[in-house]
Image (spheres, grey):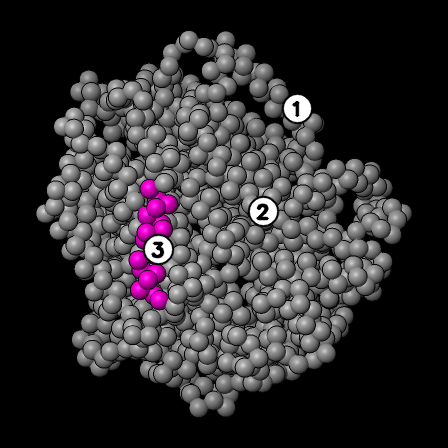
Amino acid sequence: MDFVGFLLTQCLNAFSQAAVLFFIACGLTLIFGIMRIINFAHGSLFMLGAYVGYSTVAATGSFWLALIVAPIVVGAVGIAFEKVFLSRLYARGDGGAYLMVTFGLAVIMGEMIRVIWGPHPHGVATPDILRGVVFLLDQPFPKYRLFLIALGVIAAISVWQFLERTRAGLLIRAVSQNAEMVQALGTDVQLVRTCVFGFGCAMAALGGVLAAPMVTAFLGMSASVIIDAFVIVIIGGMGSFLGSIIGSVLVAYVQVFGAYYFPNMALAIMYLLMLVILVVRPGGLLGKEE
Amino acid sequence: MNWKVGFIVCAVAACVVPFVSPNYMLTVIIEALIFGLFAMSLDLLVGYTRLYSFGHVAAYGLGAYTSALLLLHFNLPLPVTIVLAVAISTAIATPIAWVCTRTHGVSFAMLTLAFAQLGYAMIYRFKDFTGGSDGLTGIPRPEGPFGLDFFQSKIGYFYMVLFCLLGSFLLCRALVNSPFGTVLSGIRENEAKTAALGYNTRAYKRVIVILAYAFGSLAGALYAPFAGFASPELFFWLISGTVLIMVIVGGSGTLIGPIIGGVFFLMLENQLSEVTDLWPLIFGSVFIAFVMLAPQGIWGILTARFKKPAVLPQGGADGETTSAPS
Amino acid sequence: MTQKSKLILPGMTRRQVVKAGLAATAVAAAPGYMRTAGAATPIKIGIPTVITGGYAVLGSHVMRTAKLVKKMKDASGGVLGRPVEFLFKDTQGKPADCVRKCQELVERDDCRIFTGVVVSSEARAIMPKLDEWNSFFISHGNGDGRLTAELLVPNFFRANTSAPMGARTLALFLKNAEQNDFYAIGSDYAWGHSSVGAFETQIQNVGKNFAGKVFAPVGNKDYSTYITKIMQSGAQGCYVALQGDEGRAFYSQAQQYGLASRVTMVTEIVAQANIRALGKDSVGLTGSSRYPFTYETPENAAFVKRFTEEYPGELPDWSDGEMMQALDILFAAMEKADSTDAKKIVAAMEDLEVTSVKGATLMRKCDHQGENQGFVVRVSESSDYSEPIPQILNIYKREDVTPTCNSTEYAN
């Protein structure tokens, strides 16, 4: 394998990994930006997405339908949770309360999934059209991962443009800047919060469905993913959408190349990166210090 | 009510526990007390300085591994080992505190997490020394100076843990009520204002972070010889999350609350899992119920009975915020 | 699960009586007391396993087989004429919880026989305590080779095939394979290192070239960079010591990269749970199996029949078979010792040979390792089942598969 081919493969490896991470991290960062909530249950919502995706595929045979159904179902769960619990806590402005409520939700959801789907893992087959490899510079690369990269890019650009160009996007940015001001101007901040929370959960679910053909749906997929997502959000800057894109790519690159050249340090590399960035820029790359 | 009377009553009541509780319960009680101590150490940061650490497990893991390694390699008397383990952990925590206190808020939380995860990674990296995923097993409890060996029995160990817990509580209480503690509350309420008054707030924060690590490592140093092993799970980030929950459940900014929270958390988990396999459902619901119905925590519920119209915020994390009423 | 809480009261009174007995003769008191209490006193066996959390699938196998065994034993008159009672405890896969739950089993329930421990770090945490607890522990699935070598304690036995045995079986199988260079990937924890290390030695022993190895951190989920590394190595074969979640992630992704068309993958553990989740993608996977349910003996046929009747739609996984064998061996030792005392079980189990679902297994005295046959299987589609199944390619004699005493090495 020549070096250029190797480099290309590794870069694509990293981008495909970044795509999955992005789906989780962008929801987390948007939710934080607008509500100042660290959503501990985000990994569990990702896991729920994978399981709902599995059931959809099992029932209909369509992976594409799963990509639509899972975000809707999980988004609805998120909205219900926000309405019933979180919305009652905003007035309190207490970070610990959010942490506890979302921690409770994570515990409950993990157990609900075990009760509903059983402890066994469930596979989601790669859709036929995305099976197999394409050869890039003589190196095989999975079609499925190219699809992930494409979808990630499309999603990132769409959400970014939505936030920048539309009135709703403007509103979201305004709420994250100064919620009280927006409220005073007569906008229903509560509605914005509910929508953003639901959207963040739906994005996590999408990530879950997309990850399922690579890792299968299993109990415990939440724990490994939430911590990566935290790190990305922090590196990019809490609440910064662009930051979550950069953070995802950066973390994926560091993991892919780090695990290649320093397999002994694979566990530590991501945290070393976060440490360095936070020491140099305490608010993260694109964030401002709280 | 005079707190000293309350303290003595509680201490005496705690001393009686081994005689009234069945022997098998003592294991979980000792672990619960250790976790109470651990949660209390975090309260110094969360409740008194408003520094949310998300990597406090590093203190626990450090304490556990240093005491385990010391006992396995040097076989010094247990009390000496524990003191040494705390000293070493504190020394290691000093540069960590120095880096972390450059920031605050979420960045602080994540920096502490980064260090904890690095610790976790190091356990795997230096497996010849730490045992890697195997952990360290067969940790002895060598008898102490002057032939002290009461801690070799379970009841004796209970008293040693209790002694450490009560001692730490008194120390921490004295600390937060001292002028030093007043500055900390100042930092909690408004760091900029406190700095403007001429206090070097970063130095204060550095000290309190080091102290929190010291007490946290004491908890870890007590755990490893009790369980007889140390494993990488003692460094796992999820424990940082659960201990934060313990602090909040108990009532942050009260010292006693987090102790109760830690004991409550561990006992609840242990006992619920005895009763039903679906225990996580109940466990999770309890936390949500606490936030929704009893935001002041367990200690808040307990004390509300005694002092009805008294001060409302009572050192709660949000004394200053004057946001819209609910 | 209500019966669990009810246990507390009778357990407590018994404990107090036993405590009095212990004062007189520490060792003999417990069984002595039990016998006078009447034939109906159940034999308690503690199962500190993973009920909730990430490893729950392995715990669920342990529990379903134990429940099935209880039904079978109770129907056939029990063990030593007494019914069997399994006490399931949730450790969540954490060593700290495992130690605590075992301690409670000993002190509250006077239950001194353990099996069904899933995670090897849990096993390691409780093993040094067995003597103090006067307890007995038989492993049904812990793979780390050192448990019956440098880490052995007197009250521990391993009924199952260990990681070095799995690696050895594969090496014997690969001796005549067309591939010459082998690479290895393992999980960065005890079992992974034990397995890869054994394979490295064994494959060189049979005259092949070992091209290199890499360990992925515990909980790793994206294997793209490791797959690239394997392809780069130029090896024609790759040994995979990843199981559970990690194994499935690796195979799914390897499939997407078309790795199988370039490199022949062999694995130390073929698990039905993974086969089912991977579906058709698992077909062709070759590896050693700790227990393939397709093994054709009367004992195993009876077990599989009973199992599929009890759990329609399920197939016994390796951990079900290993659990079944461990319990068969445990009960045989109890019958032989005519006792449930830890020390007496140990004595009775030494050099005991039991024919269970995996054929005749000898619990050798020197290092308490069970000498198991070695199975090599290939995952194939079958018209009899709705999912792919392990098809046995070769079976190796237990003498050839089991390491020299007290070691993870082989004489030749």
Q: Position of residue C19 (x, y in %)?
A: 79, 39
**On screen, residue B322 above or below A68:** above
Q: Residue at x 37, y 32 (%)?
A: A97
- Would you identify the image quadrant in which residue A33 lies? top left
**Chain under callout 1:** B
Q: Is residue A207 visible?
A: no
**Chain under callout 3:** A
Count of numbered badges drawn on the protein: 3
Three-letter code for the amino acid on which mark 1 is drawn: Val
Residue indicated by mark 3? A70
Q: Magenta span covers which residues? A: A62-79
Q: Residue at x 74, y 45 (%)?
A: C110
Marker disc for residue C275 = none
Q: Are marks 2 and 1 in contact (CB under 8 Å)?
A: no
Three-letter code for the amino acid on which mark 2 is drawn: Asp
- Would you identify the image quadrant in which residue B71 lies? top right
Residue indicated by mark 1? B16
Comes first in the chain, label 2 or label 1 = 1
